[in-house]
Image (cartoon, rainbow, N blue to C red):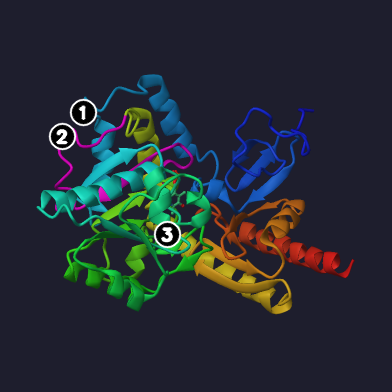
Amino acid sequence: MAQAPSPTVPTDHILRVYNRAPLAFERGRGARLYTVDGEEYLDCLAGIATTGLGHAHPKVVQALKDQAEKLWHVSNIFRIPGQEALARKLTDATFADVVFFTNSGTEAVECALKTARKYHWANGQPERIDIFGFDGAFHGRSYAAVFAAGNPSYVEGFGPALPGYKTLPFGDLDAFKAAVGPDTCAIIVEPVQGEGGARALTPETLKAMRDHCTEHGVLVIYDEIQCGLGRTGKLFAHEWAEGAAPDIMCVAKALGDGFPVGACLATAEAAKGMTVGSHGSTYGGNPLAMAVGLAAFDELSKPETLENVRTIAGYFTQGLKGLQDRYPDVIADIRGKGLLIGVKLIPNNRDFMQLARDEKLLVAGGGDNCVRLLPSLLLTQDEAREAIEKLERACEAVRKKAAA
Ligand SMILES: *Cc1c(COP(=O)(O)O)cnc(C)c1O
C-alpha cells in the first residue's frame, strides 16, 4: 500500500501558507476522490468550485489528450485559433465584446482593474482611480487583488496600501451611493460572495448598484470566478438580476475544470484603453488551455447542466433546512445560491470540516463560520442524498462531542 503523508509531519519544503488537511488524493472520477490508500470520499468542494464538471470528465480529458499530442504552447505574438473560438463562445453568451485569457482568477482580476483605470485615462479623466470593493470579498492574492478586496488579514504586513482602493459594507446601498464621487473609477463585486461565506446580493441591490454606476460614469466589474459558469443555476450569477450586466467580468475556476485558465471579459467601450502593448501574458490562452476550456465551456453551458444545478440545489436546500430543523444547536443558517451553498454553523467550522471528513465527505470552509458545499454541477440526486446523510452524521458527532 502506498505511503500516506503523515498527519503530524509537516511538508518541510513547501512554504507554509496553507493549513493542510492530512489527506493526499491519487485519482478522482465525477464527485468521488480516492486517497493514495484507496479510501473513497464524496467531494462537495470540487477544488473550491473549480472542477465544475467533476473529476476526469471524459470529454475534457479527451480534449486535453488530443491537444497534448498536437501543440501545447506558442505565444500570443501569433493568432491562436482556440482563443478565437473560446472568445467567440464567451462573448456570444454574455454582455462582452472582447476577452483576455489568463492562467488564474487573480490575473483576470488584475486585467479587469487595469482595464478600468485605463478606460478613464483614455477618456481624459486620469483622476478617476478609486475602486470600491466590499467587505468579505475575495479577489485573489496579487498586490492589487488583496487591496481590492480589503480583507485586513490578507493585506497585513505587505507594506503601504495601494492608492485608490476602498472597502465598503457589502449590500449597503446607501453607503455605496454616498461613496461614489467624481474620482470613482469602478466597483468590483461578487454577485454571490464565495470565500465570504456564500453571501448573495439580492437582484434588486445588484440592479440598483449597476444603475447608480451607469448614472455616474463608474465601471462595474463582476468577479464571477467562483459564482459564474453555471454554479448558481444560470450561466452567470448576475443573470438572476434583470438589466444588471457589468462592463467587465472575471471568470476562471470552472472554466478549465481544474486546468489553469481564466478570462477577463469586457465591452468594447470599457476595453478601449487596452491597446497594443498595454497588457500581456506568456501562457494566457495557450493552445492547451484553450482546448480544455472549449470542451469544459461546452458542457458547463448546456441547458441540461444548468437545469441539473437548479434541481440539485433545490434538493440540497430542502435537505439542509430539514437538518437545520433537527439540529438547531449545530446549524444556524443555510444560504447562498444554486450549488454555492453556505451552511453557517454554531460549532467551529474547521472542527465541523474534520467531522465531515471522518464521514468521508469533503466540504470547503468559508467566512462567517460557514462551511460551503460546492459540488460538481453534474452531481446526481443520489449523491446529494448521500452528502446530506453524511452531514447528518457529522451533526450527530458534534452533539456527541458536546456531551462528552
Ligand atoms: C478563487 C477566486 C479568485 C482567485 O482566483 P485564483 O485562480 O486563485 O487566482 C478570485 N476571486 C474569487 C471570487 C475567487 O473565488
Q: Secondary structure at mark 3?
A: helix
The residue depicted at 55 percent of the width and 46 percent of the height is 47
Question: Cα distance, mark 1 to mark 3?
Answer: 32 Å
- Which residue is at a point 48% across and 61% down the rendered structure image? 309
Relative to residue 33, is residue 301 drawn left or right?
A: left
Q: Position of residue 27 (x, y in %)?
A: 63, 35
> Horizontal and vertical percent for residue 108?
34, 45
Q: Which residue is mark 2?
A: 276
Give the class, few, some or many, for how many residues have Cα within 10 Å of label 2's Cα (few <14, many ≥20): few
On residue 79, which mark appears? 1
Q: Residues within 10 Å of mark 1 (few under 14, many from 20)?
A: few
Query: Nearest the camera: 264 or 276?
Result: 276
SS for callout 1: loop
Q: Residue at x 26, y 46 (%)?
A: 114
Residue type for callout 3: Leu
Residue 176 percent across, percent down from the top left: 33, 72
Closest to the camera, between mark 2 and mark 1, is 2
